[in-house]
Amino acid sequence: MRKGGTDVQHGRRLRAALKRSRPIPFIGIYDVFSATLATRHFDALFVSGFGFGASHYGMPDVGFIAWSDMVSFVQRLRAVLPEPHLLVDVDDGYGDVEVACHVVQLLESAGASGIVLEDQKRPRRCGHLDGKQLLELDEFRARLRRVLAARGDLVVVARTDATDPAEITARIEAFVAEGADAVLVDGMRDLDLVRELAARVRRPFAFNQIAGGKSPARTLDELRAAGMSMVIYSTPCLFAAQGAMDEALRALRDEDGRLREPSPDVVGLDDCCAVLNDNLARRQAAAGIDEEHALPMRRASRGMGGSR
């Protein structure tokens, strides 16, 4: 089914998944390669603004992202990873309600399952850092209302960065009244307040965890008991890559430039090519290209050990 020329399959699939009892873990990724590795273990991805800003620009999460870059990234993701749920961080809607509506429609056309729209005003910053400023509630309500009207069946998660419990409660209730599909309180320290709000609004509730961030680390079972339907892990791939790259380059320097041999703990050429060849095969299959006419790289991988 299509609405306004937009394929709504991904949004429908996510809505159906949110009705299950166990919360969905969304793994934050920062490029197509990290997304590919994440789908080996999980079936839902989060396009993290923090991760994308770091990877694409080398800049902190303070509003550097251009909406056109984000749309292009989601298009590249869907070209090789058509199946996982894909939740996209659109920050404040890029500072303008007309732009927000345009971007939401483009992302839905590109295959996004849902988006997270926040109530910060610029200059914005990561939700787990101090110094955030909020839009007036009426202004954000108007923006949220327009975005909800503009989407097809895309899941819209309305996020507040408020810290005062009374203001958090007022904003979450306002988001639900406008028709948000799900809600998120970012940088939340008090799990009891989350539990109370989740029971009160009876709407899918999201919880965002970042290593070293404000929110307490909790298991999926603990968060299910607190009423969570979505658990966002914004940065595990980025942080793991930073640590692994730093360690590998330090070893290369300390060992006088001698590369370590591939092993179960050290990735080599065969391992990396296997991941890339799987992506190529998936993309060719989606395009209806049979193996006989596939690009040589896929067939050559058989001589390199195939996939792990």
Image: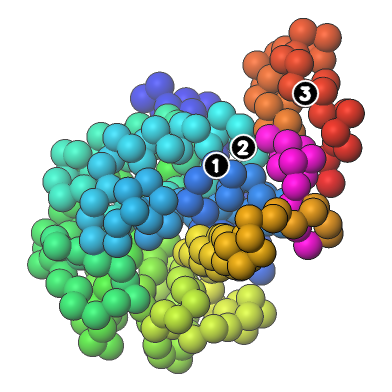
Label 2 crowd bin: few (<14), some (14–19), many (20+), radius 10 Å = some
Q: Is residue 261 magenta?
A: no
- Name the residue carrying label 3: 298
Residue found 83% across the figure and 57% down from its top: 263
Residue 98, picture quadrant: top left
Label 3 crowd bin: few (<14), some (14–19), many (20+), radius 10 Å = some
Residue found 59% across the figure and 44% down from its top: 33
Part of the protein shown in magenta: 265-276
Residue found 24% across the figure and 51% down from its top: 64
Is the residue under label 1 in contact with that under label 2 (CB below 8 Å)? yes
Q: Amino acid at mark 2?
A: Leu
- The mark nearer the N terminus, 2 or 1, is 1
Residue 45 visible to the viewer: yes
Residue found farthest to the top: 293
- Name the residue carrying label 1: 32
Residue 251, picture quadrant: bottom right
Q: Amino acid at mark 3?
A: Arg
Label 1 SS:
helix
Q: Could you tell me residue 308's position as x and y percent?
A: 84, 46
Residue 166 visible to the viewer: no
